[in-house]
Image (cartoon, rainbow, N blue to C red):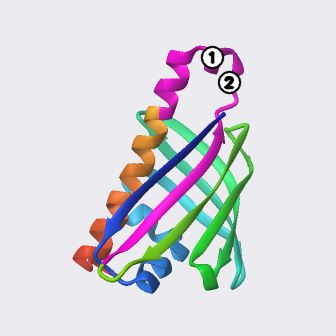
Amino acid sequence: MAKISEQIQIRGNKQEIFNLLKGFKSFPAFMYYINSLKVTKHSSTSFISDWSINIDGVPVRWKEEDLVNEANFVIEFNMIEGDYAKYKGKWEVLQDSHNAKIKITVDIDWGAPTFTSFVEVKKILTRKTRKAFKGMLLAIKRKIENKVNL
C-alpha cells in the first residue's frame, strides 16, 4: 500500500477549477490516457463513475464513488470495485492571493502482495502512479490557464 500526494499551482479561480474537477466526465477530451469515463449515477453531492485508463500500456479499470464537498472545495473518492485492492483519496482546491492550487492525495493498494513485497517493484508502481497523477494535474492546468473549451 502507498500514500501518494501531488499538487500544482494554477493561475485561475478556485471555483472555476473546482467546477472542472466536478465535471470530470470531460477529462477524456483532454487527458489522452483515459480510455473511457462514464458517470452512471449522480446527484448534487455525489457521483458513481466507471473509469478505464491506460498507464504505460497497461489497462486499468475501476468504479468509484465521489463525494462533493462544495463548501470546502474537496472531492473525496473511493473505489467500489476494480483492478486495485484499494483506491481512495481526495482532490482539494486551495486559493492564495494570486493563484490556486490543486492537490490530489491517494491511498492505493495495487493488490499484488507477492510483487509489491519487493522494494524495487513497489518503487516502480509508485513512480508510474505519480506520473499518472502529475499528468492529470498538468492537463487540468493547461485546460484552465489556456481557457480551452471550458
Q: Label 1 neighbourhood size at 10 Å, few (<14), some (14-19), many (20+)?
A: few
Left or right: residue 17 compared with residue 4: left
Dots 2, 1 in contact, CB < 8 A? yes
**Whether residue 109 is visible:** yes
Q: Label 2 neighbourhood size at 10 Å, few (<14), some (14-19), many (20+)?
A: few
Q: How many marks?
A: 2
Q: Residue at x 43, y 45 (%)?
A: 132
Q: Is residue 122 one of those drawn in magenta? A: yes
> Which image quadrant for residue 102?
bottom left
Image x and y of residue 150, in percent = 35, 82
Q: Is residue 80 one of those drawn in magenta? A: no
Residue 39 vertical placement versus 8 (above, below): below
Identify the magenta region.
99-126
Q: Residue at x 32, y 76 (%)?
A: 99
Image x and y of residue 18, in percent = 49, 78
**Whether residue 30 is visible:** no
Q: Residue furthest right?
A: 80
Q: Quadrant of the N terminus?
A: top right
Q: Secondary structure at mark 2?
A: loop
Image x and y of residue 136, in percent = 41, 56
Image x and y of residue 90, in percent = 61, 61
For marks 2 and 1, give the CA distance.
6 Å
Q: Secondary structure at mark 1?
A: helix
Q: Which mark is residue 70?
A: none
Q: Amino acid at mark 2?
A: Ala
According to the picture, the residue beneath numbered tag 1 turns out to be 115
Q: Residue at x 73, y 37 (%)?
A: 85
Q: Residue at x 64, y 33 (%)?
A: 110
Q: Amino acid at mark 1?
A: Phe
According to the picture, the residue beneath numbered tag 2 turns out to be 112
Q: Residue furthest left?
A: 146
